[in-house]
Structure formats: structure tokens, C-alpha cells
Amino acid sequence: MERAERAVAALVVLVLLVAGAWLLAGPARETHDDIAAQRRLVAAQLTTLQQALQVQHEQLAIAREQLQVSQQTQSLVRESLGATQDLRQLAQQLLTAARSTDAKAADLTALSRQLLAVAATIQRLAVATEQHAANLDRKVP
């Protein structure tokens, strides 16, 4: 029986080795599958990150363009402000000139009224003088 026992023992050892290998190979296969799945996930994440980075580059380019437009707008606003200030100063000068002209026109109007009054007086005097001369002519033979 020694031989039969050895054969049985060898068979048991062989079964144990196959079972052990099977037990080790099962998790190893699962680990290999897990690693492959992780690689696929990491690759997908990398692709997503690359796309996100590309979008951020595009957004940066747009932001730079917007900054340039904003700077141009700011420059135009400054120029417009300067022109508006110049225009306001000219309008103030025009208002001052108009007020001065209005004051002069009021003075001229007053002088014209006075001249009209003097002219009316002179006319009355002339009419009176003419009548007086006519009366004198009648008295002188």
C-alpha cells in the first residue's frame, strides 16, 4: 500500500496544486481585468481632461480678444470724454458770448428808445418852430 498511498498522496498534492493555481489564477485574472478596466478609465479621463484643457485654451483666447476689445472701447471712451469736455467748454464760451450779446442788445435797445424819444422831441420842436415861423410870416407885412 505504500505505493497506492503514494499515488493517492501525489494525486492529492496534484489536486491541491491545481486548486491552488486555480485559486491564484482566478484573482489574478480578476486583477488583470481590473487593471485593464482601470487603464480604460484612466484613458477616458485623460481624453476628457485633454478636451477640457482645449476648451480652456479656447476660452482664454476669447477672453484675450474680449480684453483687447475692452481696451479699445476704453480708449474710445477716453477720446470721447476729451471731445465732450472740449465741446462743453465751447458751449460755455458760446453761452457767455450769447449773454454778452444779449446784454449789449438790451443796451442798444435802451439807447434806441432814448434816440426815438429825442427824435420825437426834435420833431415836436420842428413842428412848433415851423408853426411859429408861419405865424411870424403872417405878422410881417
Image (cartoon, rainbow, N blue to C red):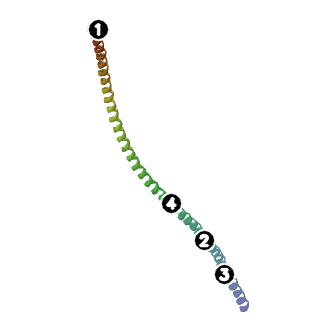
* Residue 13 position by quadrant: bottom right
Q: Nearer the viewer, residue 37 or 83?
A: 83
- Indicate whether 68 appears above or below 36: above
Tell me whether circle 4 and circle 2 mark residues in contact (CB < 8 Å): no
Closer mark to the observer between disc 4 and disc 3: 4
Q: Secondary structure at mark 4?
A: helix
Q: Along the polypeptide, which appears first: circle 1 or circle 4?
A: 4
Closer mark to the observer between disc 1 and disc 2: 1
The three-letter amino acid code for the residue at tag 2 is Ala
Give coordinates of residue 42: x percent, y percent.
59, 70
Q: Along the polypeptide, which appears first: circle 4 or circle 3?
A: 3
Q: Nearer the viewer, residue 99 or 7?
A: 99
For marks 4 and 3, give the CA distance: 65 Å
Q: Which residue is mark 4?
A: 65
Q: Secondary structure at mark 1?
A: helix
Q: Which residue is mark 1?
A: 138
Q: Along the polypeptide, which appears first: circle 1 or circle 2?
A: 2
Mark 3 residue crowding within 10 angstroms, few (<14) / some (14–19) / many (20+)? few
Q: Which residue is mark 3?
A: 21
Q: Along the polypeptide, which appears first: circle 1 or circle 3?
A: 3
Give coordinates of residue 94: x percent, y percent.
37, 40
The three-letter amino acid code for the residue at tag 4 is Glu
